[in-house]
Image: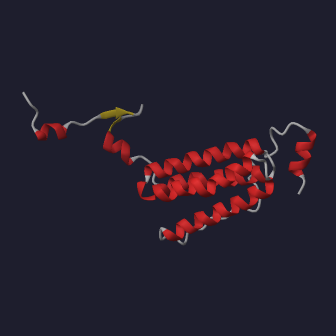
Amino acid sequence: MTDSPESAFSHQHVVNNGKRDLTLDELAATQPGLDRLMAELGPRMHRLYFAGKAGNWPLAGYFFRSVVKQLSLCAFSRPKYADAITSYLIVECETVRLAIKDADAAAFEASYATMVQRANGYHDEFAKPYLHWVCPATPPDDLDFTAGLSTPEQTRRTTAG
């Protein structure tokens, strides 16, 4: 006995999130849009900047990886932007990664500025010129950007100007 085309389409997969049963369509509707994903990206970018500015390269690397992971999720969830985000990861983000790897403060500052400028350019290209990104003038006060810098010289270097 073969299933009719109608019966093949009438089957619903149901998952349980621990609170209720959901169809896959209902589960998909709960996934964040790009606006929410980008709102999560901003604080990571700011922490990346201040970690690099402090010369805390392990912390900068940690936040860099978090930024890349979040941007990759953005590209996956919104295919319309996948090519632009992939290009951004390959070009602008890569120069930041290399500056972190080399512990090069000047290269980090320059590549981070370029990364922000290009992100704002993408916002313009995708008809959102009202979304322009700036880094706050002061670091967030909920994170010690010198944590993990063990030697007195590393601590002096990161707290000086």
How far from the left and from the top, in percent, is residue 66?
62, 45
How far from the left and from the top, in percent, is residue 65?
63, 44
**100 vs 14: above or below:** below
Relative placement, left or right, of 58 versus 161 is left
Residue 65 visible: yes
Relative to the observer, which residue lies in front, 3 or 121?
121
**118 vs 38: above or below:** below
Relative placement, left or right, of 22 versus 150 is left
User: Which quadrant, please, contains the C terminus?
Assistant: bottom right
How far from the left and from the top, in percent, is residue 136?
72, 61
Relative placement, left or right, of 13 versus 71 is left
Relative placement, left or right, of 148 versus 34 is right
Q: Quadrant of residue 59?
A: top right
Relative to the observer, which residue lies in front, 56 or 133?
56
Residue depicted at 28% across the width and 35% down the height = 13
Q: Quadrant of residue 24?
A: top left
Residue depicted at 88% across the width and 50% down the height = 159
How far from the left and from the top, in percent, is residue 11?
21, 36
Residue depicted at 90% across the width and 53% down the height = 160
Q: Disc count in the image?
A: 0
Residue 47 visible: no
